[in-house]
Image: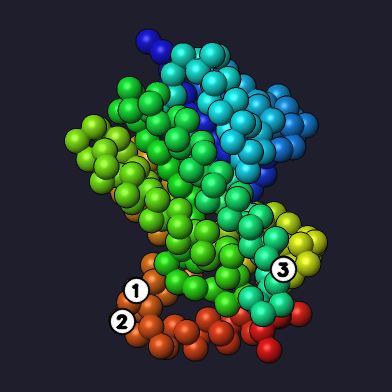
Amino acid sequence: MQKKVVVITGASSGIGKALAEKFAAEGFDLVLAARRIERLEDLQKQLSGVEVLSVQTDVTKETDCRNLIDSAVAKFGKIDILINNAGISMRAILADVELSVLHQVMDVNFWGTVYCTKFALPYILKEKGSVVGVISTGGYMGLPGRTGYSASKFAIRGFLDTLRVEHLRAGLHVLVAAPGFTASEIRKTALVKDGSKQGETPRKENKMMSAERCAEIMFRAIKHRRRKMIISFWDGKFIVLVAKLWAWLVDQILYKVFKNEPDSPLR
């Protein structure tokens, strides 16, 4: 019997790396994608007992995404699960940010998800497999100072929810996973108003959920073919619920929280 095959984008660090480690531990063969091929190759050496293919991929490029899927099928003959995890954040208010920053965030987060899903879909449908999109609570409510980021995550949620309905009778599983604040590199590589990287995170990473814990929860959600999963309580399920009931209150809370960050772009 063939092992199941999972394709993970953004696998060089953070949640993507933790997902690769978790799926390898569960016996899945892996196709790992990221721009930093050397990191993928280092990770590949650490994973044992499974077959791993590392493919250098810039998800903003349609040709790279097609090559990723073609390479996966050439190697393993099928794809059971696609996890669209590659993502980038930003930190600037709309009045200050250069439009190129918003384009870049949307290209990575939204179009990267669209490209990979489009090319992988025929193979996943054949296996009645899973398409997964990693968003955040920013895909349920607007995060101040993250206009492009929240917009891209809302877009991913709308795209995947629609994909699920389109294939309701085809056996396709679609999961939209929304972690809360999770320890990763995403805040260090977040783009500021001129497109340069933020560098230092404005939040206490050691107080956040670990990427490994997030990966464990996501693995179970995929295994049980959940439709949606908000991963974390206070900065996830609770705040999303309150936003449905008292949106005005959540606006005030979010403004205060993000205004109090070091070097906040909020005035």
Q: Is residue 231 visible?
A: no
Counting from the top left corner in percent of width and height, residue 262 is at: 74, 79
Looking at the rendered structure, the kind of residue marked 2 is Leu
- Count of numbered marks: 3
Other-residue count near label 3 (Cα within 10 Å), few / some / many at <14 / 14–19 / ≥20: some
Tag 2–tag 1 contact (CB < 8 Å) = yes
Tell me how far mark 2 sits from mark 1, CA to CA: 7 Å
Q: Quadrant of residue 16?
A: top right
Q: Residue at x 63, y 57 (%)?
A: 103
Closer to viewer: mark 3 or mark 2: 3
- Mark nearer the N terminus (3 vs 2): 3
Tell me how far mark 1 sits from mark 3, CA to CA: 33 Å
Tell me how far mark 3 sits from mark 2, CA to CA: 34 Å
Q: Please state, as top left, top right, bottom left or bottom right, where the N terminus lies in the image.
A: top left
Label 1: element kind: helix
Label 2: element kind: helix
Q: Is residue 76 above or below residue 45?
A: above
Q: List the single residue furthest toward the top.
A: 1
Other-residue count near label 2 (Cα within 10 Å), few / some / many at <14 / 14–19 / ≥20: few
Counting from the top left corner in percent of width and height, residue 198 is at: 77, 64
The residue identified by callout 3 is: 98
Counting from the top left corner in percent of width and height, residue 228 is at: 34, 53
**In the drawing, what numbered circle is on residue 245?**
2
Label 3: element kind: loop
**In the drawing, what numbered circle is on residue 241?**
1
Looking at the rendered structure, the kind of residue marked 1 is Leu
Q: Please state, as top left, top right, bottom left or bottom right, where the C terminus lies in the image.
A: bottom right
